[in-house]
Image (spheres, grey):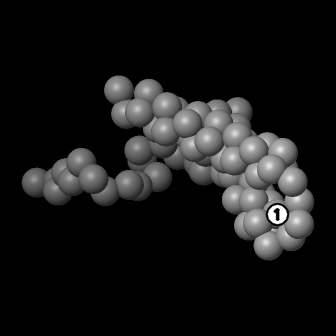
Amino acid sequence: MAHTDPYRLTLADSRDGAQADIGPTDFVGVLLRVALVVSVIGNMVVSYGVAGSGAHLAFGGVTAVCVTVLVVRRLRSRR
């Protein structure tokens, strides 16, 4: 009797038995995460500097957009 564990990931679970390449949706997710990290670091740097409120708003806006898009993509992928 074969042990079937629905949560175990094996090579047999992939379509052709090989490692799957990064698809376009994964690439967009990676870019969103990189933009999120850069915008958070940029906002921290601007906070310690003497930049105007425009820089704070720009970095904060990018952060908010990245977080929103990542959450929406995550919720849509769970369906």
Residue furthest to the bottom: 48
Which quadrant of the rendered structure holds the C terminus? Answer: top left
Residue 58 pos. (x, y %): 79, 43
Q: Residue at x 70, y 59 (%)?
A: 40
Residue 78 pos. (x, y %): 37, 33
- Residue 20 lies left or right of residue 34; in this view the side is left
Quadrant location of residue 77? top left
* Vertical order, 58 against 43 (above or below): above
Q: Residue at x 65, y 37 (%)?
A: 65
Residue furthest to the left: 1
- Residue 46 lies left or right of residue 16; in this view the side is right
Residue 35 vs residue 58, the one in the foreground: 58
The residue indicated by pointer 1 is: 46
Query: Mark 1 belongs to which amino acid?
Result: Val
Quadrant location of residue 27? top right
Q: How many marks?
A: 1
Q: Residues within 10 Å of mark 1 (few under 14, many from 20)?
A: some
Secondary structure at badge 1 equals helix
Residue 52 pos. (x, y %): 87, 54
Residue 32 vs residue 49, the one in the foreground: 49
Residue 63 pos. (x, y %): 67, 47
- Residue 7 lies left or right of residue 57; in this view the side is left
Which quadrant of the rendered structure holds the N terminus? Answer: bottom left
Residue 49 vs residue 34, the one in the foreground: 49
- The answer to whether residue 26 of the structure is visible from this angle is no
* Vertical order, 5 against 69 (above or below): below
Q: Residue at x 70, y 40 (%)?
A: 61
Q: Residue at x 75, y 59 (%)?
A: 43
Residue 61 vs residue 47, the one in the foreground: 47
- The answer to whether residue 54 of the structure is visible from this angle is yes
* Vertical order, 32 against 15 (above or below): below
